[in-house]
């Protein structure tokens, strides 16, 4: 019990003002510090039922509420006596309208709809250590004599758990049907229909805290006796506890909170925090100078609040993570407008902002490529989308930055417009009426054909390409074959460059051959044949050949013409810029 004595002496020293508060607060690894939300009082516990509400209590008998944007003025709810026997020890909130705080004199204080009650005796004069309230009609509190008191909405019923009267140090109740307690001897016990003692789970003896995301996942943390050796965590999988694993070189992990089986945060006595990602713990990082951080509460996998000595509060915020994907409304027909509806994202306080990227995919919804410029929440389907499916990628951002893009489900295969594109004597590869040529994107141009346009309504298919991506010496080119499935597009992609000659010496290079009185020749830098079925979408890679690589290495940058040729006819050209690293 020496570790208990050490902590008692530390607490007495702080209350007596023997320690001076640090001059400033620091932050790291996603944490920010809000200093002195409670003056210089020692904050001992915090509970956050949601990202928009937290309640913290201190050793001076005050409660401090957070409303999702700022900390409120401290309110005195249980001022200590001259002997400090009724010091507040813990608080738990089931919602923004119900909390319970317990003290060292066996009393409870209730917060209902913004108003605190007077302290009420629930355990004689026995020191209450912890409390957990999953609802306003069910709480469990633990005390120094190994008793667990259960609240039913109107009264408390004490029951000694089968741990031999050892002090309960922490309790966690993720639901009305499951609670976990840990005690000062390193043992754990569950409450389902009755109390079930699980025995010793940590040979390091001094367990400090436990948090359960569900009945199938809990984490308990400890402190090394007298400060020798590292602090550990043990994990419960619904049936048994793991062996203790050292995760912190400091002597005391004061508190742990698990929002899910994939995210927990723990804080220690040296002003550090560490997080768990579902498989491993991060290294501890200093987040509040060398202040002892006493409690942490994580209402979501991207947001936590911690409280420390000398009145500091700390907030952890990570970029949003997707919970459910976005969706698309609209008809998958050329010329129709599709609109994306937001998915669901985890987030801390504050509004999310959103980014969008529409993509063309093949008819099976795979092999998707970005549609250049399609970055709004709505997108109007074009002729080049016909025969593919389309999806939207949504990215949510908060003050910590953007999350990972989350795709919607793909649409149905995009159908041609009801008016069709055939007939007439219009120019362009897609032919018909006043139809325009196939788009190459960027500085590319479509064909200028003068004969009858190709009619996708008959057994004819026409290829098109979107703006490629360039990575060093390779162009990644999205190709589309628009037409019935019985037709094919046999095309060739080629890269060329024009050399301007003076005598036998090359004096200039360009992507295009200019019609002027100079001697020029076209040099091939690589080509590839491609065959696509009607309605097919494919990503094709075309790399510079040996000549192109040599030119790029010598010049460091190179502009080449990319041409799409079908049946001997150039459908589109694009100027590409290659750069050596």
Image (cartoon, helix red, strand yellow):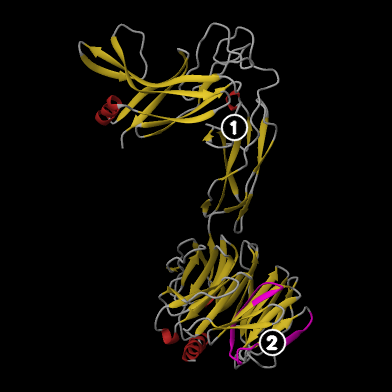
Task: Give coordinates of residue 453: x percent, y percent.
Answer: 58, 10
Q: CA distance from mark 1 to mark 2?
A: 67 Å
Task: Give coordinates of residue 256: x percent, y percent.
Answer: 54, 73
The answer to whether residue 121 is visible is no
Numbered label attached to residue 107: 2
Farthest left residue? Answer: 504
Residue 420 versus residue 12: which sits nearer the camera? Answer: 420
**Residues packed near mark 1 inside 10 Å, few (<14), some (14 to 19) or many (20 plus):** many
Task: Please name the residue that numbered disc 1 is placed on.
Answer: 363
The total of numbered circles placed on residues is 2
Numbered label attached to residue 301: none
**Residues packed near mark 2 inside 10 Å, few (<14), some (14 to 19) or many (20 plus):** many
- The quarter of the image holding the C terminus is top left
Above-or-below relation of 9 to 396 = below
Which image quadrant for residue 156? bottom right
At a point 54% along the width and 67% down the height, the residue shown is 264
Residue 488 versus residue 111: which sits nearer the camera? Answer: 488
| Residue 156 among magenta residues | yes
The answer to whether residue 489 is visible is yes
Task: Give coordinates of residue 566: x percent, y percent.
Answer: 48, 16
Q: Which residues are magenta?
A: 154-179
Above-or-below relation of 562 to 243 = above
| Residue 19 among magenta residues | no
Above-or-below relation of 381 to 569 = below
At a point 59% along the width and 89% down the height, the residue shown is 167
Which image quadrant for residue 520? top left
Q: What secondary structure is found at the residue carrying circle 1? A: loop
Task: Give coordinates of residue 396: x percent, y percent.
Answer: 58, 48
Q: Earlier in the sequence, mark 1 or mark 2?
A: 2
């Amino acid at each position: 019990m020496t570790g208990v004595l050490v902590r008692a002496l530390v607490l007495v020293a702080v209350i007596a003002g023997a320690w001076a508060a640090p001059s400033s607060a620091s932050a790291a690894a996603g944490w920010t510090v809000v200093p002195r939300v409670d003056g210089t009082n020692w904050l001992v516990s915090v509970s956050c039922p949601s990202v928009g509400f937290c309640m913290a209590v201190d050793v001076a008998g005050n409660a401090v509420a957070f409303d999702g944007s700022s900390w409120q003025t401290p309110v005195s709810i249980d001022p200590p006596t001259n002997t400090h026997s009724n010091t507040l020890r813990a608080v738990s909130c089931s919602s923004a309208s119900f909390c319970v705080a317990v003290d060292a004199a066996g009393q409870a204080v209730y917060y209902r709809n913004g108003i605190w009650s007077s302290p009420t005796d629930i355990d004689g004069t026995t020191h209450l250590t912890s409390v957990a309230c999953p609802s306003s009609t069910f709480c469990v509190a633990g005390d120094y004599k190994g008793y667990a008191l259960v609240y039913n909405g109107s009264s408390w019923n004490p029951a000694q758990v089968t741990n031999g009267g050892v002090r309960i140090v922490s309790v966690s109740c993720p639901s009305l049907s499951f609670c976990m307690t840990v005690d000062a001897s390193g043992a754990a016990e569950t409450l389902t229909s009755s109390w079930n003692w699980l025995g010793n789970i940590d040979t390091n003896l001094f367990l400090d805290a436990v948090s359960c995301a569900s009945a199938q996942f809990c984490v308990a943390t400890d402190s090394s006796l007298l400060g020798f050796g590292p602090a550990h965590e043990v994990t419960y999988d619904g049936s048994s506890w793991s062996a203790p694993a050292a995760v912190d070189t400091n002597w005391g992990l004061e508190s742990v909170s698990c929002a899910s089986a994939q995210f927990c945060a723990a804080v220690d006595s040296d002003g550090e925090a560490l997080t768990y990602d579902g498989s491993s713990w991060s290294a501890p990082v200093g987040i509040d100078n060398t202040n002892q951080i006493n409690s942490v509460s994580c209402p979501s996998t991207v947001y936590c609040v911690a409280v420390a000595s000398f009145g500091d509060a700390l907030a952890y915020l990570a970029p949003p993570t997707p919970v459910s994907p976005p969706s698309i409304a609209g008809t998958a027909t050329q010329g129709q407008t599709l609109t994306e509806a937001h998915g669901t994202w985890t987030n801390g306080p504050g509004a999310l902002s959103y980014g969008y990227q529409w993509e063309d995919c093949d008819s099976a919804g795979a092999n998707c490529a970005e549609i250049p410029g399609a970055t709004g929440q709505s997108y109007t389907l074009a002729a080049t989308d016909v025969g593919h499916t389309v999806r939207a990628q949504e990215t949510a951002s908060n003050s910590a930055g953007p999350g990972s893009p989350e795709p919607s489900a793909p649409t149905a295969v995009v159908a041609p417009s009801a008016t069709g594109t055939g007939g007439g004597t219009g120019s362009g590869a897609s032919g018909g009426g006043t139809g325009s040529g196939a788009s190459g994107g960027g500085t590319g141009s479509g064909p200028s054909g003068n004969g009858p346009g190709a009619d996708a309504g008959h057994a004819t298919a026409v290829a098109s390409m979107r703006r490629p991506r360039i990575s060093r010496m390779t162009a990644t080119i999205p190709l589309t074959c628009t037409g019935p499935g019985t037709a094919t597009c046999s095309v060739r992609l080629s890269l060329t460059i024009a050399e301007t000659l003076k005598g036998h010496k090359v004096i200039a290079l360009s992507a295009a051959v200019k019609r002027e009185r100079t001697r020029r020749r076209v040099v091939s830098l690589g080509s590839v044949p491609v065959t696509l079925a009607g309605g097919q979408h494919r990503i094709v890679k075309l790399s510079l050949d040996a000549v192109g690589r040599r030119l790029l290495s010598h010049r460091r940058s190179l502009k080449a013409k990319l041409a799409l040729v079908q049946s001997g006819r150039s459908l589109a050209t694009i100027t590409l810029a290659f750069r050596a690293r």
